[in-house]
Amino acid sequence: MEPMERLEKMVELTDQLSDLIEAENLALEERRFLDVEATLEDKATLARLYENSMKDLDEANLDWKAIEPDLHEKLTTAGTRLANAVGENTMRLEVGMTANKQVIDLFAEAVQKAVPHSGTYSKNGRTGKEGTRAAANSVAVTLDQNL
């Protein structure tokens, strides 16, 4: 394949990857997590193709000064769009992971505080408070799967 054809293919691949990541960003914003999950395989495939294409272009020793201005502009625009989409995607995924970790930590802390005991057994084999008051300290925990 000719170098200029490779560059045209690279623009197409970059645009496809940008489209997919932008769609994922929108799904993350709208909390459509099943849609996010559905894009993972395609995103991984396109990312591998993109990486391989970049390696091929690097090995081709292109004369970047010989690239037509129109194609150069397309490459620059596609690359900038992808970088912006990836940046937003990274931020959204990190925020989501941090929020999930904080929720899980809060649950763990609440459960630990709800059953105060020394960790030893009483004469009837129970730990913590005795009798009917022990049941009052039990905590029911539910988790919204949207988290």
Image: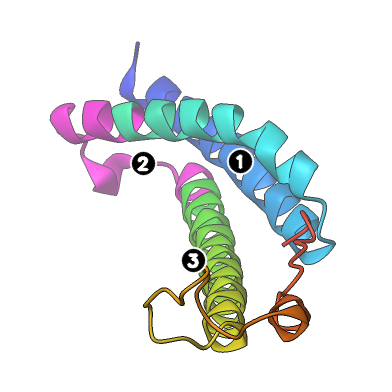
Residue 70 magenta-highlighted:
yes
* Left or right: where 142 falls relative to 64: right
Rendered view: 50 above or below 84: above
Rendered view: 121 above or below 26: below
- Tell me where the magenta segment starts and ends, as one range: 53-72
Of the residues under marks 3 and 2, which one precedes in the sequence?
2
Q: Amino acid at mark 3?
A: Gly
Percent across and percent down for residue 146 are 78, 57
Which residue: 55% across, 56% down? 77
Nearer-the-camera pick, 10 or 39:
39
Can residue 39 be seen from the camera position used here? yes
Of the residues under marks 1 and 2, which one precedes in the sequence?
1
Can residue 8 be seen from the camera position used here? no
Of the residues under marks 1 and 3, which one precedes in the sequence?
1
According to the image, label 3 marks what residue?
Answer: 125
Percent across and percent down for residue 78 are 55, 50
* Left or right: where 34 falls relative to 79: right
Viewer-side label of 1, 2: 1
Which circle marks residue 123 in the picture?
none
- What secondary structure prevails in the magenta region? helix
Nearer-the-camera pick, 111 or 107:
111
Element on which disc 3 rests: loop
Q: Amino acid at mark 1?
A: Asp
Element on which disc 1 rests: helix
According to the image, label 2 marks what residue?
Answer: 67
Nearer-the-camera pick, 138 or 4:
138
